[in-house]
């Protein structure tokens, strides 16, 4: 394997890693702050992509479609949180089951609206060129995804460590009772966090649209990948998700070269290994129950 | 030889040192009470002795067997049994079933999977006898969450006792009880056969002096003093840090 | 007790003569209900009696089915195939459970889902053996030593016997000292540890046992359907069986079986009218999660209690049981 080919592979791995990060980070934060496993997370991802696709179909450009899709996803997220999840506050397992039922509903609704064909969002013209890497070339759009992933990570880092919202969310993760004792509206924080998770998921979906496409069943393969990322990274730690997502992206891409049939198996094996060595995940602070 | 020996046990949570080099022993037949202000590390010590928490340093030895690296369920097999400061019962099961589960733990047929538990009458006979001794027999068909708090507190002790332990650890057995219930519980504890050694954490000084052969004072995670009730009472320093200011009752 | 025996006898008679009154489609459907009931009971066992909620239970059903399909090319003996299916699904449940059970409930939920998908991907990719995405046919024929059982009515009776057998074995199991201990672990794990019980080992026993039961359901399904496909291990199928358990009623043995019957009937009925079956199923599922932990069996019992005043006690007891088996 030539050096430039290797570089291209690593970049591909990074692209997928960043996509997985965008998928998993919302799940991870919702889990950490609200103690909810959102099993409809993959559905939010695919829905975001479908919506952007349809907006583009009406003649809007990629970026407008992206923003519209994010706004609607946020509204849907707020509705899910307020209407469904509030009914089972304090019962994490029931909340997980509710989102599981929701995943069924959303999968069927999406099939209803968009059918069963494979769609792909066209790469935005701004990034529709390739970067020359000697013998191989690398699509600029993928580099763009890597950059967006890093930007999101920086924003998260900044929000967590430098802002009041971050302090509240951080405290919410560590000590729910204390936050409510401080007179902070925990419900508003929860809704906000859930909306944030939904928007980030949709962002991943739209940005991933030109790479992954959209089809029935993608919602659950996306969900499974993000669950694995969250388990490896550690419950509720977005930093863990960041590292784990890149790990998974690289393992998958490199695994695809060496053992194409077994890349999923490889990722699973990594997860089992991590669980054996550190049951709370790479960056986990112990188990949330 | 002592029944239980705790040697140099230390435990920290992050930078917070809860236990520092604690040495403690319980002699056979002894009733040993640990007292100390809140945050002295009493419950943590219990958790370390029973294996709920791994210890950072030291040793826990029971009757010559080193328990230090054993999980809680294996320590129970060595005759170590405990109650919890907060009731820790099977709330959705009947009182009878609660005790039966504890009694069953000692039975050789506990892994049988082809005969109903109900058909093993000896488990229930034993359970009934225990319930009778502790005045709870008429409650046997109630779910635990239907019992009064005091009754639940008694059941908490009863479950631990059903294991027929050689050493029973009681974590604030009378906390939250009414004065009458406390008196009753003291009588129950005093009536226990001497073959069961006791290690008790207790705040209520009436209870402490009613049952203790020996008292150990834990302070800031260290053993501050240890001796007979009279010796501890007479220790000026203990009086100062612990009994001082007339806070004898609620210290 | 006498009355229970009477009802059991009545049920038995109905089961025996039912095929006389059913169309061939009805027989086919009822057979499927029996198989799904066994599968649902296996998940109901770990959910309602061991507190383990799995999102990948179809894995063991699929292992049982594929064992019969693949091994059936080389071995014809029904007993050998069934035993292999049971052993293999139990073994894989044991090994995977060994890693999964030590972690918290959330992790368990996520890892079982991932594990199911892993198996799905594996079957998809091992095309030469499994037939890949296209699935493969099942060649062996049910034969318990008195001739080939090919007639749908024969298979109906086989699945009916299986259902009754599994029900009584599970009944024995949950009431046995071992089963009661496992339930104790679900109710209060930390206390059970203090009482000298190795909590994780007990959960693992339940998980392994449940995997074996799911495996036998899958094995019989392979005979019944004479075709297996990766859908048998997919998340959708795992989700469906979870729906059966929740809708039927967790914490009872028969609840999941009732849920299976409800589910299969509704699915067949609905699919003649609408393609939006998954949507309807999802809504029903959400409804039952929000409204009733007791599920359908709770409802049936409540109605039963109304009609039969003499049975107040036993009905109440059942309901109590179902409530105490709630999700915690």
Image (cartoon, coloured by chain):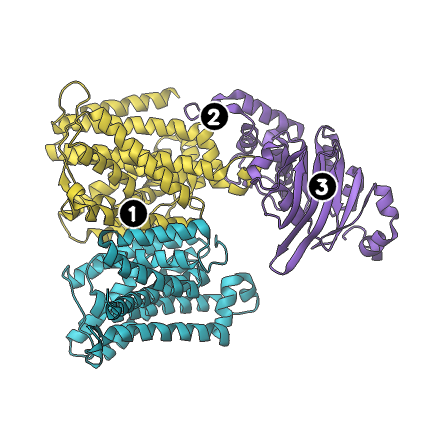
Chain colours: A cyan, B purple, C yellow
- Where C288 sits versus B195, above or below? below
Q: Residue B194: horizontal and vertical position, in percent? A: 74, 29
Q: CA distance from mark 2 to mark 1?
A: 35 Å
Residue receiving disc 2: B117
Residue farthest to the top, as pictured: C146
Horizontal placement of C114 versus C101: left or right?
left
Relative horizontal placement of residue C195, taking residue C206 as reference (left or right): right
Please state which of the two labelled residues, at mark 3 or mark 2, is closer to the viewer.
3
In this rendering, is residue A219 above or below C46? below
Check the picture and name the quadrant holding the N terminus of chain C: top left
Circle 3 SS class: strand
> At which x and y percent is residue C28?
15, 34
Q: Which residue is mark 1?
A: C116
Question: Do the residues marked 1 and 3 share a common chain?
Answer: no
Q: Residue at x 71, y 50 (%)?
A: B21
CA separation in Å, label 3 and label 2:
33 Å
**Which label sits in the foreground, 2 or 1?**
1
Residue sitting at the far front: A2
Which one is nearer the viewer's eye here, C266 or B1?
B1
- Residue B160 is drawn in which quadrant? top right
Q: Residues within 10 Å of mark 3 (few under 14, many from 20)?
A: many
Marks 1 and 3 sit apart, C-alpha to C-alpha, by 49 Å
| Mark 2, secondary structure of its residue | helix
Estimate how packed mark 2 is, as few (under 14), some (14 to 19) or many (20 or more) residues with alpha carbons within 10 Å. Answer: many
Task: State the residue at coordinates (30%, 46%).
Answer: C243
Mark 1: secondary structure: helix
Report whether C204 appears left or right of C167: right
* Residue at x-position 75% and y-position 36%: B31
In the picture, the disc for residue B200 is 3
């Amino acid at each position: 394997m030539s050096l430039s080919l290797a570089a291209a592979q690593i970049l591909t791995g990074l692209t997928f890693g960043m996509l997985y990060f965008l998928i998993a980070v919302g799940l991870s934060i919702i889990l950490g702050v609200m103690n909810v496993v959102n099993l409809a997370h993959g559905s939010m991802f695919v829905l975001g992509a479908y919506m952007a696709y349809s907006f583009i179909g009406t003649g809007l450009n990629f970026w407008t479609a992206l923003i519209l899709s994010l706004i609607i996803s946020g509204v849907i997220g707020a509705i899910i949180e307020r209407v469904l999840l509030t009914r089972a506050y304090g019962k994490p397992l029931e909340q997980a089951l509710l989102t599981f039922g929701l995943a069924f509903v959303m999968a069927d609704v999406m099939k209803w609206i968009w059918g069963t064909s494979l769609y792909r969002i066209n790469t935005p013209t701004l990034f529709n060129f390739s970067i020359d890497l000697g013998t191989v070339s690398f699509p600029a759009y993928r580099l763009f995804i890597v950059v967006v992933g890093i930007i999101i990570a920086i924003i998260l880092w900044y929000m967590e460590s430098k802002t009041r919202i971050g302090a509240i969310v951080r405290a919410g993760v560590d000590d729910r009772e204390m936050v409510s004792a401080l007179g902070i509206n925990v419900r508003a924080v929860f809704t906000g966090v859930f909306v944030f998770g939904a928007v980030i998921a949709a962002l991943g979906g739209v940005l991933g649209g030109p790479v992954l496409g959209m089809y029935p069943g993608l919602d659950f393969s996306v969900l499974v990948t993000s669950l694995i990322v969250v388990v490896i990274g550690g419950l509720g730690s977005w930093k863990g998700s960041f590292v784990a997502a890149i790990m998974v992206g690289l393992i998958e891409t490199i695994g695809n070269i060496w053992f194409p049939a077994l890349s999923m198996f490889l990722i699973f094996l990594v997860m089992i290994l991590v669980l054996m060595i550190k049951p709370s995940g790479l960056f986990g602070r112990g188990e949330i129950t | 030889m002592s029944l239980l020996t705790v040697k140099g046990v230390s435990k920290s949570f992050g930078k917070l040192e809860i236990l520092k080099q604690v040495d403690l022993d319980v002699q056979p037949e002894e009733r040993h009470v640990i007292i100390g202000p809140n945050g002295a590390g009493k419950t943590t010590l219990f958790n370390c002795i029973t294996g709920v928490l791994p210890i950072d340093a030291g040793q826990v030895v029971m009757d010559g067997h080193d328990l230090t690296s054993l999980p809680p369920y294996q320590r129970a097999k060595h005759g170590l049994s405990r109650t919890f400061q907060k009731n820790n019962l099977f709330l959705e099961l009947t009182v009878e079933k609660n005790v039966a589960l504890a009694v069953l733990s000692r039975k050789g047929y506990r892994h049988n999977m082809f005969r109903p538990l109900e058909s093993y009458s000896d488990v229930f006979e034993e359970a009934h006898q225990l319930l009778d001794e502790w005045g709870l027999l008429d409650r046997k068909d109630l779910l635990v969450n239907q019992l009064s708090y005091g009754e639940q507190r008694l059941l908490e002790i009863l479950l631990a006792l059903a294991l027929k332990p050689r050493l029973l650890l009681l974590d604030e057995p009378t906390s939250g009880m009414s004065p009458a219930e406390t008196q009753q519980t003291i009588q129950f504890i005093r009536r226990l056969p001497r073959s069961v050694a006791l290690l008790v954490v207790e705040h209520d000084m009436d209870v402490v002096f009613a049952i203790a052969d020996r008292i150990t004072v834990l302070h800031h995670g260290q053993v501050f003093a240890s001796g007979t009730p009279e010796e501890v009472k007479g220790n000026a320093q203990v009086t100062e840090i612990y009994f001082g200011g007339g806070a004898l009752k609620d210290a | 007790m006498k009355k229970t025996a009477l009802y059991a006898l009545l049920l038995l008679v109905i089961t025996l003569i039912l095929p006389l009154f059913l169309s061939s489609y009805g027989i086919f459907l009822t057979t499927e209900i029996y198989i799904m009931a066994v599968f649902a009971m296996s998940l109901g066992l770990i959910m309602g009696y061991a507190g383990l909620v799995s999102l990948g239970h179809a894995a063991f059903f699929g292992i049982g089915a594929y064992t019969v399909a693949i091994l059936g090319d080389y071995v014809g003996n029904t007993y050998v195939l069934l035993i292999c299916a049971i052993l293999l699904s139990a073994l894989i449940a044991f090994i995977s459970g060994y890693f999964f059970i030590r972690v918290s409930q959330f992790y368990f939920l996520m890892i079982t889902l991932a594990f199911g998908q892993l198996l799905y991907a594996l079957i998809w990719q091992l095309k030469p053996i499994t037939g890949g995405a296209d699935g493969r046919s099942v060649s062996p024929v049910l034969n318990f030593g008195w001739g080939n059982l090919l007639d749908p009515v024969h298979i109906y009776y086989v699945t009916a016997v299986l259902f009754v057998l599994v029900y009584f074995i599970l009944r024995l199991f949950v009431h046995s000292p071992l089963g009661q201990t496992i339930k104790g672990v679900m109710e209060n794990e930390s206390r059970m540890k203090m009482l000298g019980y190795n909590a994780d080992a007990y959960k693992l026993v339940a998980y392994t046992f449940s995997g074996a039961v799911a495996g036998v359901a899958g094995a019989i399904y392979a005979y019944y359907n004479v075709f297996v496909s990766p859908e048998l291990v997919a998340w959708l199928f795992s989700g469906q069986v979870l729906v059966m358990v929740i809708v039927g009623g967790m914490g009872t043995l028969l609840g999941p079986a009732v849920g299976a019957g409800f589910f299969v009937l509704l699915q067949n009925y609905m699919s003649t009218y609408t393609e939006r079956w998954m949507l309807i199923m999802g809504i029903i599922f959400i409804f039952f999660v929000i409204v009733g932990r007791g599920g359908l069996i709770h409802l049936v019992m409540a109605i039963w209690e109304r009609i039969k005043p003499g049975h107040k006690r036993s009905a109440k007891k059942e309901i109590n049981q179902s409530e105490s088996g709630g999700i915690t």
